[in-house]
Image: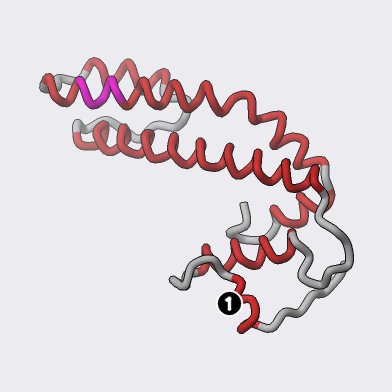
Amino acid sequence: MTLKIGDPRMIRRAALSRHKNDHRDAETILDLLMRDISGDHAENEQSREMLDLLNYRHSLVSKRTSVVNQLQAFARSKGLPRFRLPVVKARKKIEEVETTQVERLLVSSRFVLCDELTRQIRPWRAARRRANKEERAQLLMTHPASG
């Protein structure tokens, strides 16, 4: 293992945003580590592409989670229990609940979004499996907030 020590003021200057929070700090440190702040070796193009793929997959998963959370909030408001992905079983229960026309429209639209996002996410499983095989990626994934 290699210990790297960075000057907090220099790390802060490297941040893209001046609004400080833990998530942004973790992203900045991760970016500096990926660019190797010590300059020992050049960035691997394959690693950069893998990181881009994983970031895109993460954005899709985040959007799907938001839609599912909205569906869960609706289900809870109608007295239904919590559900997990996939939402196939929950969909039947939610569709059986008495709703207004607007609620039906919103729920059906959210299910369509959820289905489309799930369809978009499936091909990216291979990228995640490839990242899990790389030693450096495994080390990064053990760090909280780095994803």
Q: Where does residue 84 sit, x and y in percent of width and height?
A: 44, 32
For the point 50% across and 25% down, the residue is 118
Q: Is residue 56 magenta?
A: no
Task: Give the residue drawn at x 64%, y 30%.
Answer: 124
Position of 23 relative to 99 (above/below): below
Q: Position of residue 88 (x, y in %)?
A: 42, 18
Judged from this view, the residue extending furthest toward the left is: 100
Numbered label tally: 1
Disc 1 marks a residue whose amino acid type is Arg
* Residue identified by numbered label 1: 12
Region rendered in magenta: 105-109
Q: Height in image: 2 above or below 129?
A: below
Q: Position of residue 36 (x, y in %)?
A: 78, 65
Q: Residue at x 52, y 21 (%)?
A: 119
Other residues around mark 1 within 10 Å, as few (<14) / some (14–19) / many (≥20): some
Q: Quadrant of the N terminus?
A: bottom right
The part of the image, by quadrant, that contains residue 4 is: bottom right
Image check: 28 left or right of 45?
left
Colour pattern of the rendering = secondary structure
| Nearer to the camera, 91 or 3 | 3
Dominant secondary structure, magenta: helix
Tell me which corner region of the image, top left, top right, bottom left or bottom right, holds residue 26.
Answer: bottom right
User: Does dot 1 land on a helix, a strand or a loop?
Assistant: helix
Residue 64: % across, % down: 44, 34
Residue drawn where x is 31% and y is 32% of the image: 71
Q: Is residue 93 placed above or below 143 in the rendered structure?
A: above
Q: Does 1 sit left or right of 18 as displayed?
A: right
